[in-house]
Image (spheres, grey):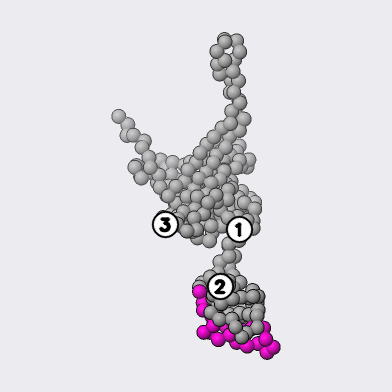
Amino acid sequence: MAAPNLFSFQGKVYLAQRQSTGKPGPLRWVGNAPQLELALEVQNSDKFESFSGNRLLYGRLVQSKTANVNLTLDEATPENLAEGLYALPATVPAGAVSNELLPAGLKAGDLVALDRGHVSELSLTDSANPPVTIPPANWWTESSAAGVVGLRKVDGFTQPYKATYQYGATVNIALFTTPPPERMLFLDGINTVTGQRAKVTLYRLTFNPIEQLALISEEWGSLQLSGAALFDESRALDPELGGFGRIELVTG
């Protein structure tokens, strides 16, 4: 009896920007990806006969074919987040802010958020002429990472207060700032049952926005990406390539 063709795939998933030539740009490994699913679907228009009295299925017209993709990512890198947030990660260098105006009418015990995070060398002054430095005993840093400052005492000083500080470098991921980019997807896979290698390629892939991103969770976080493989007319005429993608099983 022939050996059973049982399978359980694992492997590395790579994404690449699809170039205008149809070729992939530099590949980017997405990190640990515990799930990659390809779901093929057709939409049919059915015709039922009307001569037997049983209304039996008489014909089927295929109206559309779709190839949907579900990809789970375990690593919240800026690039992975940007895929599902329609963003381009932008590095914001470290810098300094002078005399940033705080809200007017602050009271003792109030918390205020500075424009920047990763704050250091913070000092507060008031709006008197000349300005007076607010003693450090009158305020505290609630969170230097988030740039949150608390006020212990406000009497005797002219509001609005002004903040001067240094801030650290960050990577900025702004939501919905780019149209959904087209990607090429590659899976360098292995059947862990038989050891057979496999390569999966999807030529044109667009992801939907992340439906839900757990910002606070007691479990491991993950990024759930879903999307669709688009038809690539430049490859459709080649039977070895197909119009959506292909699976290559290594036999030699």
Q: Is residue 134 magenta?
A: yes
| First reached walking from the N terminus: tag 1 or tag 3 | 1
Observer-side mark, 1 or 3, equals 3
Q: Which residue is mark 3?
A: 218
* Residue sitting at x 52%, y 56%: 80
Observer-side mark, 1 or 2, equals 2
- In the image, residue 160 sits, relative to residue 132, either above or below, namely above
Label 3 amino acid?
A: Glu
Image coordinates of residue 51 in percent, x first then y, are 60, 10
Mark 2 residue element: strand
> Which of 158/190 is in front?
158
Mark 3 residue element: loop
- In the image, residue 158 sits, relative to residue 48, either above or below, namely below
Q: Residues within 10 Å of mark 2 (few under 14, many from 20)?
A: some
Q: Which residue is mark 2?
A: 111
Q: Residues within 10 Å of mark 1 (few under 14, many from 20)?
A: some
> Which of 50/188 is in front?
50
Observer-side mark, 2 or 3, equals 2
Find the distance from the CA under tag 1 to the CA under tag 3. Answer: 24 Å
Q: Residue furthest right?
A: 129
Q: Which residue is mark 1?
A: 175
Label 1 amino acid?
A: Leu
Q: Quadrant of the C terminus?
A: top left
Label 2 amino acid?
A: Leu
Report the number of discs.
3
Q: Which residues are magenta?
A: 122-142
Mark 1 residue element: loop
